[in-house]
Image (cartoon, rainbow, N blue to C red):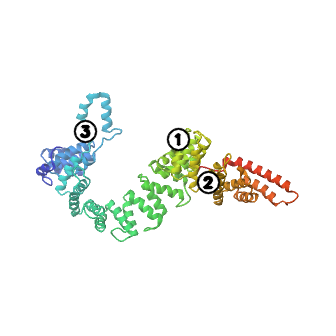
Amino acid sequence: MTVSTRSLLNLLRPGSSRSDSKPFERGLEAYENQQYLEALRFWRLASQAGDPEADYRIGLLYARNEGVIGSLPDAVAWYERAALKGHTEAQFQLGLIYFNGVNATVGPNRPEMWRQSTAARLGDKAVNLHDLVFPNGIGVPRDIDAAFLWLSVAAEAGKAEAQAILGDMYANGQGCTKDHAAALRWYEAAAEQKAAAGEFALGDVYYQGRGVPVDFAEAAIWYHKAAEQGHVRAQVALAFMCLKGTGLPENVEEAARLFQSAAAHDDTIALYNIALLRLSGKGAVKDLDRAETALRKAARKDFLPAIQALAEFYALGTAAEPDLREAAYWYEKAAERGDTQAQFLTGRFYATGTGVPPSIRQAAKWFERAAEGGHATAAHNIAVFYLNGRGVARDVATAINWFERASEGGISAAGVQLGRLYSAGNGVARDQARAAEWLSKAADGGDADAKTAYAMFLIQDEPSAERLAQARALLTDAAEAGHPAAAFQLGGLHMGRSGGAVDVPAAAQWFKRAASAGHVEAQHIGATVFRSQERPQGSAGRRRLDRQGRGRRQCRGAVQACGDVLHRAGR
């Protein structure tokens, strides 16, 4: 399109220049009787006589697939004939088509499939055949410049809908330089004709302060005008203002009414928000069934907040008992759309077989995706999977990488795992300094498991008095926090393990505490220590010492035997 907007405006005059020729009227009568081919025949005659309305009507036949094979490219050809003669509606339709573009439809019995088939069979010879059958092509490329030109012409002619869209183009710099002042003029022109699109746009202008000072009260006035005409987006915008008390008094009931009105037109955001209000009973009668229905409608439109809410609805059993199959289904939908928490939960569902068939491979996939999104617990889980070769090939280096990420995210169990790996040289070079670094960092976080693990590291082999004292302090902190394994190990230290001073009463106290928490080894050894403490003194002193010696040996053996099961890294 090479004709400039200004030159085109000079050539054209608003309105239709159609004469009241009989062929056009007869074509209109045939059309009303659904005799579309007859209407086409008469309108062609009227078109030959220079009638732009006839050109426009023929374009409509092609656009609506009435009496002819539907073809927007052919419709465009007829619209252009009418538009160049000053037909405002044709100008507007051309602007819309060029603004959006029309892709060739692929499918059975569609022109594009035929074009591809003939091109494959005939090669270059197919070009002439294509031009003969579809002289105007089978698609319309998006052309913002042409859209701006034709919408400008239609807007100048007074087409309110064109004025509102032209305002949007100026506001966004589409086909022109961004110009908020020009956008405001066109919105006002459309609003003067009570066009809802123009009124809504003015609401946006004042709400966002686009070229004018922010004025919520003025925005509410324009949103209200558009909403009264049934403009769905205006109803949603006004509902939020009522809900939050922005620019007008807070009114949750009015917000619910507006959301419901917009939801009746299947507006996604309105469906989601009316569902939330019905779930809570705020502004609307609490109705879980209707809330669920609205959430489902919004979720099926791929609206992520609705998918998340629906998953939680079923997981918590908001309306009845939890439905974990439905919950797992919707959490996976959210996971597929990139929701990190949903990816983690989906991994857990597959790992435990909750709501889905158990699948370690699927669990690993979703844990890794969540970990890539920064989920620390998922990073720890996938690290364990790589370490053990579950759901993925065993890869200690990758496991260490994920453990480090999890530790940085505050998961102390990951630091414990790293400490153990470096201490034992499990799949990595043995490095006691790095082991101490990771275990110390984990213990500094305050976790009782981590403190116990670090303490056990400190008393391995033949610890110094300083390390033994540090281990005793760590175990005491963990035991005081109710950690039975720490209490058990502390009892062992008081029985002389690792060269510490023997304090049988203190050992008995800690074994008792561990035993009361269900620690089996503590129950066995504690009973031995208790009996030795309850027997009389005096001449049986040597036998008492012998029994204490046996008790210490039993304690050490039990401590050693349970060392590998005291701490769990998984959360």
Cβ–Cβ below 8 Å for labels 1 and 3? no
Q: Earlier in the sequence, mark 1 or mark 2?
A: 1
Q: Quadrant of the N terminus?
A: top left
In which image quadrant can residue 478 be found?
A: bottom right
- Residue labelled with disc 3: 137
Q: Earlier in the sequence, mark 1 or mark 3?
A: 3
- Secondary structure at badge 1 equals helix
Q: Position of residue 229 (x, y in %)?
A: 29, 63
Instruction: Kindly report which numbered mark, 1 or 2, lies closer to the viewer in this rendering.
Output: 2
Q: Which amino acid type is shown beneath numbered disc 1?
A: Thr
Along the line of sight, the residue nearer the viewer: 268 or 478:
478
Q: Which amino acid type is shown beneath numbered disc 3?
A: Gly
Q: Position of residue 466 (x, y in %)?
A: 64, 52
**235 relative position to 78: left or right:** right
Cβ–Cβ below 8 Å for labels 1 and 2? no
* Residue 292 visible at all: yes
- Secondary structure at badge 3 equals loop
Mark number for residue 451?
2
Q: Residue furthest right?
A: 539
Along the line of sight, the residue nearer the viewer: 157 or 169:
169
- Residue labelled with disc 1: 398
Residue 162 sits above or below residue 113 on the image: below
For marks 2 and 3, give the CA distance: 74 Å
For marks 1 and 2, give the CA distance: 26 Å
Q: Position of residue 137 (x, y in %)?
A: 25, 39
Residue 129 sits above or below residue 527 on the image: above
Mark number for residue 528?
none
Instruction: Kindly report which numbered mark, 1 or 3, lies closer to the viewer in this rendering.
Output: 1
Q: Which amino acid type is shown beneath numbered disc 2?
A: Lys
**Within-10-Å neighbours for mark 3: few <14, some 14–19, many 20+:** some
Q: Position of residue 366 (x, y in %)?
A: 51, 46
**515 relative position to 246: left or right:** right
